[in-house]
Amino acid sequence: MAYAPTLESLRTHQVPDWFHDAKLGIFIHWSVSSVPAFAPRSAGIEEIFAGETDQTESPYSEWYWNSLKLPGSAVQRHHQETYGDLPYESFADDYRKGLEQWQPEAWAKHFRAAGARYVVLVTKHHDGFCLWPSDVAHPDAKWKGWNTGRDVVGELASAVREAGMRYGVYYSGGLDWTFDDRPLEGLVDVFAGMPGGAYPAYAAAQVRELIERVAPDVLWNDITWPDYPAELWRLLAHYYNAVPEGVINDRWLTRSWLIPLMRFRPITRLLEALLVRQIKKSGGSIAPPSPPMCDYRTPEYASYPDIQTKKWECVRGMDKSFGYNHTSLPEDFLSKEDLIHSLIDIVSKNGNLLLNVGPRGRDAQIPEPQLERLRWLGEFLAQNAEGIYDTRPWTRAEGETREGIPVRFTCKGETVYAFLLGRPDGDSVTFVDLPLPAGANLHWLGAPKLAGVERLGGDTKVPLPEALPGEVARALAIEGVPG
């Protein structure tokens, strides 16, 4: 069908099966900030959002340029000690030199081996640096040529699709510091920092250019959209008509008359307090405000406590940052257990995991701690793919065993998958409140069908094979459960 540039028409778009089925995507933050590659490790983004610390301690290395402008920030101190008065834009030369070592096919191979079904590249982050030689002219001559020169966007699209995955593009619509370089000190500043003037037309033209160049399967905007609703509806209708099975995320709140008011400090402080209060009230869930329409929600470094009717995607880094941070220590990274358990939990609640990779800027390589976690995912999914891909939430997401091991459920047709989030100690495990229908067949994924299953009222006692596949999580398939 053809989509009209109206809210009513756009809302008829349905999330395609491929996105429901995919479960795992790879996010890539890799800009000029990946050269200095520094952010403090003292706090996580959750503490920033909860108002427990301020933007001067932001753990996001991709915000290096903004942090550099904040008096007394850790980045400002680090930069002065390491680089003196070198301007941020000078790092672009090192980045372009590092591109000479970039092998997009090798990246795609790693992502595919990890079990990813789609990849989303940050094509332009808040620093305005474009990862493709855009034909859209920047209105300020100073920023002419503020791009890679090499068509990173197009080359990665080819490599990813050749490897059998879908390809999406991220675009920072709400912020571009080459248009408005005022320091952003808090959450409200992030929304108030939306540039005006020539920027809305520039951003729309670049997104249209990306659609024409690579027909992205995912159109992932960040922060807000700098124009008014009617213009956004035209852009999104153009996208859906060009890529009918494409999806858009939820970070598209449009320009509002409130923006100028947000720049007055008394109003900013009031709004900041209200926003922090709302985040705490929601249990710390860092999800953007819901726009009039979107295909899916994107909580950041957070999950939901139960099954969501609307499709969603948890977006997070492997450590405290999206961009590469050369100071990250082993304890800053997700453990194997936390990574695998997080994926299972997200899938059980109707979500996808968009896990970030932050390559180095100086040599275009993915650091080993990140590659190790990709391998962990690949090993787990090779054994448990049946219970993850193409599944849907069951009647409930969570359960537990009598032994106290958490359980997560998924389902596919008449098969329910019960994932143990832990290692049993004995020779059996008892699932609490899991009555089995007559004739149900059970087996651990990767092991033969079971004998000796006991029904204990509403519970089910299941024997464990001598060698149970998997280290940190394992799945029991229960066949013959009516949908």
Image (tube, rainbow, N blue to C red):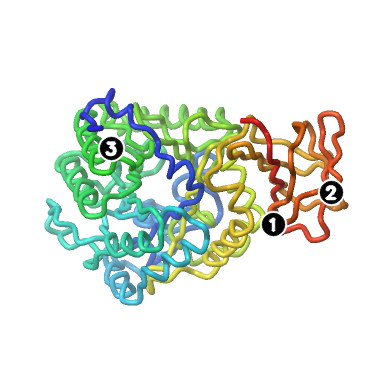
| Sequence-first tag of 1 and 2 | 1
Q: Is residue 434 visible?
A: no
Q: Quadrant of residue 161?
A: bottom left
Q: Residues within 10 Å of mark 1 (few under 14, many from 20)?
A: some
| Residue 428 in picture, x, y percent from top left | 85, 48
The residue indicated by pointer 3 is 225
Judge whether residue 283 can be spotted in this image: yes
Q: Quadrant of the N terminus?
A: top left
Q: Residue 463 got which mark?
A: 2
* Other residues around mark 2 within 10 Å, as few (<14) / some (14–19) / many (≥20): some
Image-quadrant location for residue 409:
top right
Residue topped by disc 1: 446
Residue in the image at 29% along x and 40% along y: 244
Q: CA distance from mark 3 to mark 1?
A: 47 Å
Where the C terminus falls, by quadrant? top right
Question: SS for tag 2?
Answer: strand
Please tell me which of labels 3 and 2 falls first in the chain. 3
Q: Is residue 314 above or below residue 115?
A: above
The reply to whether the C-beta atoms of the residues labelled 3 and 2 are less than 8 Å apart is no
